[in-house]
Image (cartoon, grey):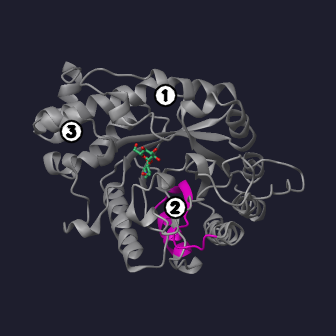
Amino acid sequence: MTLRRRAALALAAGAATGCATAQPVPAMPVGIDGAGLHQRAAAKGLAFGAAVSTRQLVDPAMESLIRAECGLLVAEYEMKWAELEPQAGDRRFRRADILVAFARRHGMALRGHTLVWHESEPAWLGGLDARATAAAMAVHVDATVRHWRGAIGTWDVVNEAVAPEDGRPDWLRRTPLLERLGPDHIALAFHLAHTADPAARLAYNDFGCEHATFWSRRRRVGVLALLRGLLRAGVPVHVLGMQAHLQAGQPFEAREWRGFLAEVAALGLTIEVTELDVNDAALPAAVAARDQAAAALVRRFLDATLAEPAVRAVVAWGLSDRDSWVRQGRLPEHRRRDGTQARPLPFDEALRRKPMWAAIAGALDAAPVRG
Ligand code: 9MR
């Protein structure tokens, strides 16, 4: 029996219900018309938004910053599988519902993030055999997409499936789901999401493609191969999400990057920048110089990216440095040797605009209007 058929049967049977910084940064002057990033993006037919959490919505200053700057929201973690189904069959949509209601109340679009990701698989999945895993994935994708049907414009269906360094001939990552179900589970997740909400745009989302390095280049080849294979097989994938966790100190070449985006666009896909931020670990400690360098990298990246008409959205992975995952230092390459805090986002910890805000605003202002 094919995986798809098996999952469909499982569905029918309801089988798996079962620091502060040393020097303060001066506030950036408000742009010519005082507009936030969302308004600047909207003027070009683009969307601008950020990853947020429900915790941020109860902080009045943060809440008003989100409303001033964002036209699109994504849950930084509250829509991940491990959060939504902490125990098998125990589905908890309530927290993420708060975000969805907030977005609706303020006329903001939503990205759904993310249905299948090896880092957010619930622990209980580990104890299941292939058949039960397929059933659990099918019910999770179906129930989740159906729950927010009509509310979420774009879903990150599969996240970070490419890892050339894992040594498979297809350059796919060796995840628990892949080991148990094989590569077909990727296509299956898209089919299930499409059935659950035929109007939602479905994205493949990945990181580490943006730089002019051997590592990034291989990842781009892997991503293109995956997309081509899915499209050839008639899989409903509509969007490529490029996370854009930029690495200061690594080379970025606009022409090379634009060539890749043009190849993606030629496949008929649209493109969204989904998790923009800058790892500044390689930059000097002095805040002014550091912020200028990070902003310059963001400006070069966005100028090149927004020149591609298929690019429709820019999403920052948070608004304020104080909330950035980079500060958690989970990745060794995020740790600053000088012990100062990372400054990866457009607003500082006091929610003041940084040069990175001006870089994003400038790139949006300079972007061609979308048709
Ligand atoms: O920034 C997110 C962090 O707060 C969460 O603890 C973590 C696990 O859910 O996920 C982080 O976001 C990741 C995103 O979902 C996918 N791309 C990489 C991001 C940083 O790890």
Q: Visible in this render: residue 334?
A: yes
Which residue bears the numbered disc 3?
Answer: 4
Q: In which quarter of the image is the C terminus?
A: bottom right
Q: Compared with residue 309, is residue 177 higher up or lower down, i.e. above or below?
A: above
Q: Does the residue labelled 2 lie within 8 Å of ligand 1?
A: no
Secondary structure of residue under mark 3: helix
Kind of residue sitting beneath label 3: Arg
Query: Which residue is at 59% across, 39% downward?
Result: 73
Residue 260 colored in magenta in the image: yes
Query: What segment is highlighted magenta in the picture?
Result: 257-285
Secondary structure of residue under mark 2: loop
- Label 1 and label 3: CA atoms lie apart by 28 Å
Residue 365 colored in magenta in the image: no
**Observer-nearest of 175 and 319:** 319
**Observer-nearest of 281 and 188:** 281
Residue 252 in which image quadrant: bottom right
**Observer-nearest of 164 and 5:** 164
Kind of residue sitting beneath label 2: Ala
Q: Compared with residue 279, is residue 51 higher up or lower down, i.e. above or below?
A: above
Secondary structure of residue under mark 1: helix
Query: Which residue is at 33% across, 67% downward?
Result: 222
Kind of residue sitting beneath label 1: Ala
- Label 1 and label 2: CA atoms lie apart by 24 Å
Of label 1 and label 3, which has the lower sequence position? 3
Count how many numbered circles sit on residues in the image: 3
Identify the disc placed on residue 96.
Answer: 1
Of label 1 and label 2, which has the lower sequence position? 1
**Observer-nearest of 13 and 159:** 159
Which residue bears the numbered disc 2?
Answer: 244
Q: Visible in this render: residue 7?
A: no
